[in-house]
Image: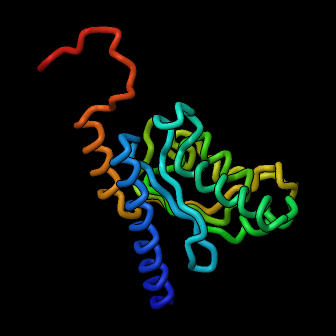
Amino acid sequence: MGSIESENSCDCNEFMELAIQEAKHALERLEVPVGCVIVENKKVIASGSNRTNETRNATRHAEMEAIDTLLQQWQRNDGLSPADISKKFSECVLYVTCEPCIMCAAALSFVGLKEVYYGCANDKFGGCGSILSLHSMSSQHSDFAEPKGFKCTGGIMASEAVSLFQIFYERGNPNAPKPHRTVLQP
C-alpha cells in the first residue's frame, strides 16, 4: 500500500505542476491565475486557464475551458453520444490550482468527473467544502444531466497556488471595478 500511495503522490504533484504552469499562463495574460489539467489514464487530455477578463465572460474559468475543449473534441470530432461522453468523464481526474468555485463544482458534478485534486482553498466561493460541498451531492439517476458527485482532495501544492494569487493581487487587477469609496491608507 505504501508504494501505491507514493506513486499517486508523485503523479499528483506532476499533474498539479502542469496546472500551476497553466495558472502562470493566465497570470501572464493578466487573468486571475487559476489553471487546470484533465487526466485520463495518467495522460493529460485537456488543460485550461482563466479567460474571464479576455473574453469578458464570467463563466470562462479554467475548469470550464478544459471541459469545453473535451466536449468539442468528443462531440464534434469523435462523434460520441452523451452516454459515451458521460462514461469518458467518469474516468477522468481534474487537477486545479484552486478549489473549484460553486459554479465549477456544480459543472464538474454534472459532467460526472471521477475525482478532483486542488491546490489552495477558495474561502469566498469554494464549492468543494469551503462554502458548499457540491462534490458530495449526487443523484440516484445515471443520466448525463444529473449531478453525480466526485471524490475531492485539497491542499496539493497549495503554497505555490497562493503565491500566484499574491503576485496577481499585489500587481492589482486591471479589470477590477473602481472602488466606490476612498481606500484608507494605514
Q: Nearer the viewer, residue 120 or 27?
A: 27
Dividing the picture into quadrants, the one containing residue 143 is bottom right
Relative to 100, residue 36 above or below: below
Q: Is residue 166 visible?
A: yes
Question: At which x and y percent is residue 107?
Answer: 68, 47
Colouring of the image: rainbow
2 relative position to 146: left or right:
left
Q: Is residue 94 visible?
A: no
Question: At which x and y percent is residue 118?
Answer: 47, 58
Question: At which x and y percent is residue 5?
Answer: 47, 83
Question: At which x and y percent is residue 131?
Answer: 53, 39
Residue drawn 79% across the image and 63% down it = 85
Relative to 13, residue 67 above or below: above
User: How many dots with numbers?
Assistant: 0
Q: Which residue lies furthest to the left in this view?
A: 186
Dividing the picture into quadrants, the one containing residue 44 is bottom right
Q: Residue furthest front?
A: 77
162 relative position to 135: left or right:
left
Q: Which of 109 and 30 is in front in this view?
A: 30
Residue drawn 56% across the image and 60% down it = 152
Residue drawn 79% across the image and 59% down it = 76
